[in-house]
Image (cartoon, rainbow, N blue to C red):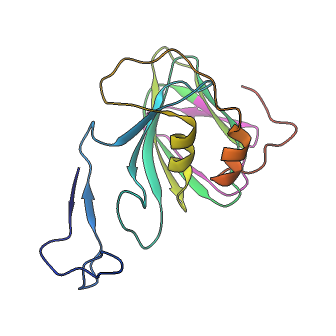
Amino acid sequence: MSQSSGVLPVDATTGAPADGRGDVLVVQPGTAESYWQPVPANGHIEVIFAPHRVAMDHPIGLGTQTVAVGGHVREHAHDRNEEVVLMISGKGRAVIDGESHPMVPGSAFFIGKNRRHTFINEGDTEITWMWLIVPNGLEDFFRLIGRPRQDGEPDPEPFARPANVLEIERQTVFAVVPPDQRQP
């Protein structure tokens, strides 16, 4: 990871370049902040860009999520955020407001506020997608429920979500879990 603002003077309050230019952050493969994820997803996430990593005027969170064979992201919604998902590898299914959509490399999804969605790995290999959430906050959720991960280390045994996961969800980017939450 390298961060560069050039050799220009910086604003003492914000740390941004004094000439009004924004920061630059370059993240190379294997150098992103990363966390193992608990059941039911298993797998891991990488946080590539977020406000705690680089100064930004419009806070976003961008990263990747890899879900193990047989894993899934439970149905949820974001009441204050919009999400974009771009499939990178693997095969699965997205269910958005009860409607099923194939997830294959190149599939892209825009998911507006309060749209219930789940992602299910239906293949025989891991499934990976890139996520973008506006405004940011998903990266905080992943950090709070996950375990730190180093690139190349072996997968841990599956582990449970924290007991206070619903509280963590509400403090970050998730809507209240509906009483009729669907299972894959």
Residue 36, horizontal then vertical, whole percent: 47, 29
Task: Answer with left or right where residue 155 lies relative to residue 137.
Answer: left
Residue 41, horizontal then vertical, whole percent: 58, 27
Residue lying farthest to the right in this orientation: 179
Residue lying farthest to the left in this orientation: 7
Residue 127 within the segment the image draws in magenta? no
Residue lying farthest to the bottom in this orientation: 19
Task: Answer with left or right where residue 154 lies relative to residue 157.
Answer: left
Q: Residue drawn 48% across and 65% down?
A: 59
Q: Is residue 13 above or below residue 85?
A: below
Residue placed most toward the observer, 141 or 123: 141
Q: Residue drawn 36% across and 57% down?
A: 53
Residue placed most toward the observer, 119 or 3: 3
Q: Is residue 183 above or below residue 23?
A: above
Q: Residue drawn 43% across and 61% down?
A: 51
Q: Which residues are magenta?
A: 93-115
Residue 169, horizontal then vertical, whole percent: 67, 46
Task: Answer with left or right where residue 98 lies relative to residue 117.
Answer: right
Residue 112 within the segment the image draws in magenta? yes
Task: Answer with left or right where residue 52 lies relative to residue 68.
Answer: left
Q: How many marks?
A: 0
Q: Is residue 133 above or below residue 181?
A: below
User: Is residue 135 in sight in this rendering?
Assistant: yes
Q: Residue drawn 42% across and 18% down?
A: 155
The answer to which quarter of the image holds residue 14 is bottom left
Residue 167, horizontal then vertical, whole percent: 72, 45
Please identify the quadrant where the C terminus is shown.
top right
User: Is residue 87 in sight in this rendering?
Assistant: no
